[in-house]
Amino acid sequence: MSNEGAAINPFETAKRQVDVVCDLIGIHGGIREMLKHPKRELTVNFPVRADDGSYSVFTGYRVQYNMARGPCKGGIRYHPNVTLDEVRALAAWMTWKCAVVNLPYGGAKGGVICDPRRMSPSELERLTRRYAVEIAPIIGPEMDIPAPDVYTDSQTMAWIMDTYSMGKGYGVPGVITGKPIALGGSEGRGEATGRGCAYVIREAAPHVGLKVKGARVAVQGFGNAGSVAARILSEELGAQIVAVSDTKGGIYRPEGLVPAEVAAHKARTGSVVGYPGTRPVSNEELLELDVDILVPAALENVITKRNADRIRAKIVAEAANGPTVPEADVILHEKKITVLPDVLANAGGVTVSYFEWAQDIQGYFWTLEEVNRRLEQVMVRSYAAVHHEAEKRKIDNRTAAYVVAVGKVVDAIRLRGIYP
């Protein structure tokens, strides 16, 4: 896959996006500068004991970007390549993602520089608990609610919730989302990103003269988001999934695949590759197949200026974060390909995280049917707002989503004023 754009500082990209939108809607001066600076940044350096008794010092971050609309929300990632500028950019993008689906949140992000694949479960627990203690002064249900991200999961969140609660002396389930259901997690959280993406595709299809039922779909990345989106599109909306892929390669069957059976094959073998009755296809080739709907649900920067002109789908729905580089966006827009941007298309995850937090605060939990019904309402309403802005201003959906999001944050800043 192309690494085009990989060397670009992500926070510089995030600030340029703010400038573009501010130029469009006439935001200048101090408020524009506020939108380009995080509210608070915490860097922590802390020791963790390894299983052999030795100690290593790890560096972690928590960036709270904007709190004008409410407490911050954003994941925690464990990765060797975590940088402060990456965390800043991700916190900015979470701010806009929460605003575009009208959640009462600001954006945040956290990360620890480590390689979790080289750490035992007990080492990961000690790292997680120590990181939680270090960031505890600036997180909490009313201030900043973390969640899982790259190489963190529901168990990681359980450790953070327990550590924070021990410091308070009582259980605080609302400090974190993405928890196991037994600890106050929400029904439907695991499939929320893929399901939300499918809802947005369904809403967009009529505007490009496409019926989802019978539409040919390719999904790059058959992980959590991609596999769920494929299953919902196929089983509930009648689409025909013709190609899927994972890190080891892809499979293509023009007559269609049954996502549940492919998922079972992957669970048995570790990959979708080798599924009977299919021909192999690379991740790069999958993007260029003759399909109606393309769902990039894997890596960043996979649709570039090198391959954008060969994309044939009518709809590109970004279940992954940042799969399309800015130069490719321009090409796709010129080709009249409808891009459903990540800030909207994969916002189902943070939406159900909000539902989890709300349930924890109330101590009253919803059924799976209630969660999915409320998720559908949020995604339908949010797509409509973005589409309206795109039509009104004659702009692409990504710019329209940012116009909606930045506008909401600016309104909150103006109404609150500057204290003191």
Image: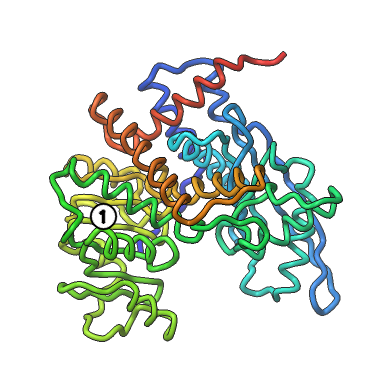
Q: Is residue 282 above or below residue 287?
A: below
Q: Is residue 19 above or below residue 168?
A: above
Place residue 266 in its image quadrant. Answer: bottom left
Q: Nearer the viewer, residue 90 or 262?
A: 262
Q: Is residue 109 visible?
A: no
Q: Nearer the viewer, residue 258 or 137?
A: 258
Amino acid found under the numbered disc labelled 1: Arg
Q: How far across and down, in percent of the image, does residue 278 sit?
A: 22, 81
Q: Nearer the viewer, residue 328 or 141?
A: 141
Q: Nearer the viewer, residue 259 or 221?
A: 259
Q: Residue at x 43, y 67 (%)?
A: 223
- On screen, residue 144 versus residue 222, left or right, reads right
Q: Residue at x 15, y 74 (%)?
A: 255
- On screen, residue 228 versus residue 166, left or right, reads left
Q: How many marks?
A: 1
Q: How far across and down, in percent of the image, does residue 165 sit?
A: 79, 52
- On screen, residue 376 versus residue 314, left or right, reads right
Q: Is residue 214 visible?
A: yes
Q: How far across and down, in percent of the image, does residue 354 sit?
A: 55, 44
Is the N terminus in the top left, top right, bottom left or bottom right quadrant? bottom left
- According to the picture, the residue beneath numbered tag 1 turns out to be 306
